[in-house]
Image (tube, rainbow, N blue to C red):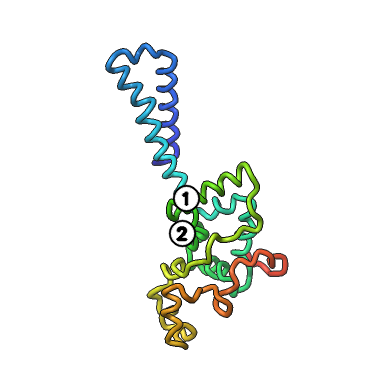
C-alpha cells in the first residue's frame, strides 16, 4: 500500500474512532454497532498489518541500517579501497544490490530470521531507544556460509575456482558450513571497523 494511501486510511480510522467515543449513543443501532466494529477493530488491525509490511520493506534498505549510530562504521567500510575487504568488494562491484547491501548478506538476522531472531530484533530496538547498544556490535553466532551460497552456489567462478577445488574435501566442507568462507586464509577481512582510520576510500 502506498504511503499516502496508508496515511489517509489512518486518518479515516482516527476520525471514526473519535466519532464513536464522542457519541457512544450511535452504537445502539445496528449500523452504529457495525461502524464501531470497523472503527475499533477492523480498521486498526488492517492499518497495523499494512504498517508492519511497509516497515519491514523499509528496514531492508541499507539507509535504514545505517541510520543507527553504531552501524555507521559498517557502512563506511563498504567504501574501503581494498579488494580484500569482502563487503566492500561486493558493494563496490555491484555483486549485491547497493540499496539492500546489509540485508542481502544478513538475511537471517533479527527480524528476518526465526521467531527467536525476531525477539532479538526487539531487544535491539529496546537498546537503541531506551538503553545503550553494544559498541562494537557482534554477531550472535558465526557467519553461516548459507548467506554466501544463496548467491555464489552454481556460479562458475565459485564452483570451478582453483582454491575451492585444490583439495577434494574443501568444496563439500564449504557447502556443509564445516569450513567457513570467512576462515583465516580465506575471505577473512570483513568489515574490520577498528582499522578504518588506516585505510583509503573509494569515491563513487
Marks 2/1: CA distance? 12 Å
Q: Residue 26: percent from the left, percent from the top? A: 35, 13
Residue located farthest toward the top when viewing the structure as drawn: 25
Are discs 2 and 1 less than 8 Å apart at CB? no
Going 42% across and 75% down the picture, which residue do you hit?
175
Q: Earlier in the sequence, mark 2 or mark 1?
A: 2
Quadrant occupied by the C terminus = bottom right
Q: Establish if 140 lies above or below 55.
A: below
Which of the pair 86/117 is nearer the observer?
Answer: 117
> Residue 85: x percent and y percent?
59, 71
Residue 176 is left or right of residue 64, and the answer is left
Residue at left 46%, top 66%?
A: 147
Of the 4 image quadrants, the one containing the N terminus is top left
Q: Which residue is mark 2?
A: 107
Please report the residue visible at 49 percent of the width from the left and 57 percent of the height from the top. Answer: 109
Q: Secondary structure at mark 1?
A: helix
Q: Give the residue at mark 1.
A: 118
Which is nearer the eye, 176 or 56?
176
Amino acid at each position: 500500500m502506498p504511503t499516502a494511501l496508508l496515511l489517509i486510511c489512518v486518518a479515516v480510522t482516527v476520525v471514526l474512532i473519535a466519532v464513536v467515543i464522542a457519541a457512544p449513543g450511535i452504537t445502539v443501532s445496528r449500523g452504529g454497532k457495525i461502524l464501531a466494529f470497523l472503527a475499533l477493530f477492523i480498521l486498526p488491525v488492517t492499518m497495523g498489518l499494512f504498517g508492519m509490511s511497509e516497515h519491514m520493506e523499509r528496514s531492508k534498505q541499507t539507509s535504514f541500517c545505517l541510520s543507527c549510530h553504531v552501524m555507521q562504521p559498517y557502512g563506511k567500510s563498504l567504501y574501503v579501497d581494498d579488494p580484500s575487504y569482502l563487503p566492500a568488494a561486493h558493494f563496490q562491484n555491484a555483486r549485491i544490490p547497493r540499496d539492500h547491501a546489509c540485508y542481502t548478506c544478513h538475511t537471517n538476522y533479527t527480524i528476518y530470521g526465526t521467531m527467536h531472531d525476531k525477539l532479538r530484533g526487539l531487544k535491539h530496538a529496546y537498546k537503541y531507544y531506551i538503553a545503550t547498544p553494544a559498541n562494537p556490535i557482534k554477531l550472535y553466532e558465526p557467519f553461516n556460509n548459507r548467506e554466501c551460497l544463496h548467491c555464489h552456489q552454481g556460479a562458475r567462478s565459485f564452483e570451478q575456482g582453483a582454491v575451492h577445488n585444490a583439495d577434494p574435501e574443501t568444496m563439500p566442507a564449504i557447502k556443509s558450513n564445516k569450513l567457513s568462507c570467512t576462515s583465516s586464509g580465506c575471505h577473512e577481512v570483513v568489515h574490520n571497523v577498528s582499522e578504518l582510520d588506516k585505510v583509503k576510500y573509494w569515491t563513487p
